[in-house]
Image (spheres, helix red, strand yellow):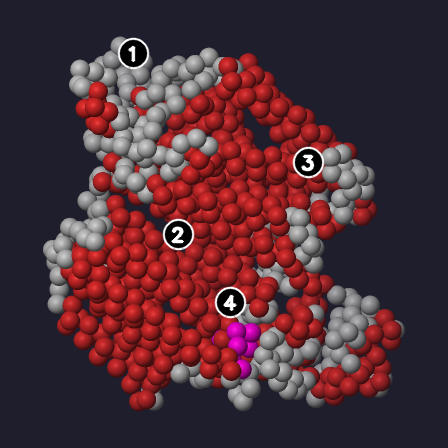
Amino acid sequence: MAHASATEAHAHEHATHEHHGPQGILKYIWSTDHKVIAMQYLFTGMFMAMVGGFMAYVFRMQLAFPGKSVPLFGYVSPGEYNALITGHGSIMIFWVAMPVLIAAFGNFLIPLMVGADDMVFPRINRLSYQVFLLSVLVILSSLFVKGGGFGGAWTSYPPLSANADYNLTPLGSSMWLVAVALEFVAFLLGGINFITTLMNSRAPGMKAYDIPMVPWMIVIASILFMLSVGPLIAGAIMLFFDQNLGTGFFDPTRGGDPVLWQHLFWFFGHPEVYVVLLPAVGIVIDVVATFARKKLFGYKTLLYTAVATGVLSFFVWAHHQFIAGIDPRMANIFTVTTLLISVPIAEMCFVIIATLYGGDIRLKVPMLWALAFVGEFLIGGVTGIFLGASGADAYLHETYFVLAHFHYTFFPIAIIGTFAGFTYWFPKMFGRMMNETLGKIHFWGTIIPFNFIFIPLFVLGLDGQQRRIYNFQNFPELQHLQPVRILATISLVVMLFFQLFFFWNVIQSWWKGPKAPRNPWKSNTLEWTTESPPPHGNWPADEMPKVYRGPYEYNHPDREEDYWPQNLPA
Amino acid sequence: MSEQHHPDYKKIYVALVILLAISVAGPHVGLKWLTLITAFGVALVKANLVVENFMHLKWEKVVAKWVLGVALVLMGLFFAGVAPDVMEHTGDRWVNNAAIAAVARGIPDEEEEGAPESGGAEQAAASTETAAAPAPAAPAFSPETQFKQVCSACHGMEGKGDGPGAAGLDPKPANFTDPAFWADKDDATLVKAIREGGASVGKSSAMPAWGSLYNEEQAKQLVAYLHTLKGS
Amino acid sequence: MQKPIATTRSATGIPTGRLAVWWVLASEIVIFGGLLASYVMHRIGHPEWAVAASHTNTWIGATNTFVLLTSSFTAVLAHQAAEHGDGRTAAKYLFMTIGGACTFILIKSLEWTHEIREGFVIQANGFWSFYYTAAGLHALHVIAGAIVMAFVARDAMKGRELHRVELVGIYWHFVDVIWIFLFPLLYIAK
């Protein structure tokens, strides 16, 4: 360190951050350090992913082998089936994708990547996790209360969701609603931190266009979330009152309107998918730039495209309601806007491909995940176009085609994007290197079965198979498709089996993997300039980094090395 | 704590109170358009005064104005996208019968609307149980409202058998304006068709059995209403 | 707890705390905006709600509006005092503002008690459902604001964290602005 010659007391006073946080076990529960909070979100999110994945396993087993007892679960009743699909959808979006992509990566990386010592509001940060944890407890316990967990789908349309005589889960449905509302509050609190930290707390010299894509994308996503969730919070209050106070906000016989709920929900629900997409794209960008050893092609294009996507995302929501009875004139407008939004998203894929072109590509495990993201998400994106056209959607709505489309978008976002980020930043987070071979086995064992689960679902959807049905043997015209369902289910089981390689890799690497250097991937961004894992305060207080250039100066002609960290003076 | 700008807060406060007085006085003039101006126009002016001067937005960096402005614009967008479905009760080839019926039903002035009418929806029983209000007299059964709310979906608003639901039906729903329909029907048959379904009187099974919604007396009132549709 | 260096930086030129408050307000605009937009749509589409709306008491509503306006006035005076470094005066004005908040809640409680006794309960019809939900959500924000303000006032009395006086003030003015719109919506548009 630069102050080695100073007296011990002097060095202690200046070089470290004067925060003697909680010690011992309390450190992991009560800390305000953004890195600890990030880990809390990460592990909670990964645990919930296991819960959501287990639910998928159970209901897919029911679909493939109807009426048979599912190993590790038992017989699935129709009510339980509904609760499982509702729980799977809700958990994967609200308790896996959002906490991992936004809260975990955001909390860990934003202060590090902008050169700050923590988030601007550490105690609000801690509070956000505590509220989030409470929401986890509520949603999980809702599955075990009298009547069972809510089974009205993650979209929770009234009158089904408002009236216990219909949904048969009076306690479960209200608890679901409360859990979702708490999750919203947690992310509003967290979002304030991310946005304010990015806007205000950058390292000296870091101009707006020097910020790496990950913080930008997470902050744009947070803004999208904050601005879109308001009407749904209002709607949730209204639905809660309908459920518990006998109001009739969504009851047509009392002057209410169930379509209003749909609008309130989807006004949020559509921007929400971009809330989770953008961070994943940001992660993929950073990984691709590092492992292609190439400057990002079109930084400003990508940034403006992301903003344009965010803005447009507010204009497309009713494409989820094409056959709900909305005014056909609105359906026309929303078709146009929905088809339009495919343009900026395609643009983002082009930017990634253009960055790869001519690069010095290293196929490390994080890069494999990033490349898989592009390919798989493309399938999801183009199938969305069929659904965005209201004419085609009239046939395809509520079929398995929709299901396959959004799994081809969500899975790349929540699973592939997460693995790309996790394997990339694992050395920084845990101070160890992961095993490449295990990583590759896990990668292929996930990607190949994934396609064998969901391509068949496109086929099923085109054949007219509806969603949210407990047993397709009850439909004579759909019985012949059973082998397809069995194929999808077996592929899921295979994919789940291969996740064991991931867990083994994590545990083994953490325990006795090779120690990670500061910058194993030779990347430019600021988080790689500090120790692995970073100490409290990230850098010594008098050695906070300064920034001299953009984040993607790889293979710069003026430089001998093929990378040029942001914090090195010219 | 950057801005040194402090307007005369007292003056602004006095202006706000005067504006409040105007908005309270407005309705007493009795002109609807004037009331709207004094109520909402004043609200806008007051809000502007508070936001610019008390919140110091007048002297704030422009990014804050953008943040708030975007949120407001989004609310306008929300309204524009949802009002055609929720505020309007008819549109391009659709009709919101329940809402029209609610408007037609009105709200009795002496007591609040406790239980909704028993027709029209299965929620009736549930909402009667959950209403916590002191039990009012149940609103009178209105066959016209029931027809408009429930029957018109297939039979059409004027009973011509041309409702939206009739498109996919063959034979078409009964046309109550056609004298030929009435030539061979007596009231008892019609009551039975309503309560036990079309098949119970040798007609199409597409006509459901509404007996769980309408008792004998109510079904008779409905049939009486159908008579009024003759030759319309 | 020591403030992180991050909190003291300001690339935008707006102090971090105030920047955060603007974002909080944006999120509140969309929450109340969604609720009120839904109310307006229904109110315009259901003219028969005028019958129910006629039972709100305009004078009580106007009194409460006056109370909140006055409390906004005292809040901004607190800010002015804090700007001059006078923590004790700032705290005094903040306590007056809290007093206004309590008065508001008291009047509202009496108002609602009366209305509920008359049978105008939340389930009565769509108008009353929106009335209690909107005013209730607003009242919750009043209470939360008053609680936070008490903590800020306590610190201000000791001359500490004076910048927070302005921040809680901005939030308070926003709560006032919401009511400025609720008042005509619920009490005048009949």
Residue drawn at (78%, 81%) of the image: B215
- Of mark 3 and mark 2, the one earlier in the sequence is 3
Q: Which mark is residue A57?
A: 3
Specify the amino acid type for callout 3. Answer: Tyr
Q: Residue A524: which quarter of the image?
A: top left
Expressed as whole percent of the image width and height from the top left, the position of residue A405 reads 58, 40
Of all chains, the one bearing label 3 is: A
- Of mark 2 and mark 1, the one earlier in the sequence is 2
Give the magenta-colored segment's residue range: C119-127
Task: Single out the mark in the foreground, 2 or 4.
Answer: 2
Expressed as whole percent of the image width and height from the top left, the position of residue A189 reads 39, 47
Residue count near mark 4 (Cα–Cα under 10 Å), binned few <14, some 14–19, many ≥20: many
Q: With A326 as the anchor, is A359 left or right in this view? A: left
Specify the amino acid type for callout 1. Answer: Glu
Q: Name the residue that disc number 4 marks.
A: B86
Residue drawn at (74%, 38%) of the image: A73
Q: Name the residue that disc number 2 marks.
A: A227
Residue drawn at (42%, 70%) of the image: C135
Q: Residue B193: which quarter of the image?
A: bottom right
Q: Which mark is residue A561?
A: 1
For residue C43, above or below residue B54: below
Of all chains, the one bearing label 4 is: B
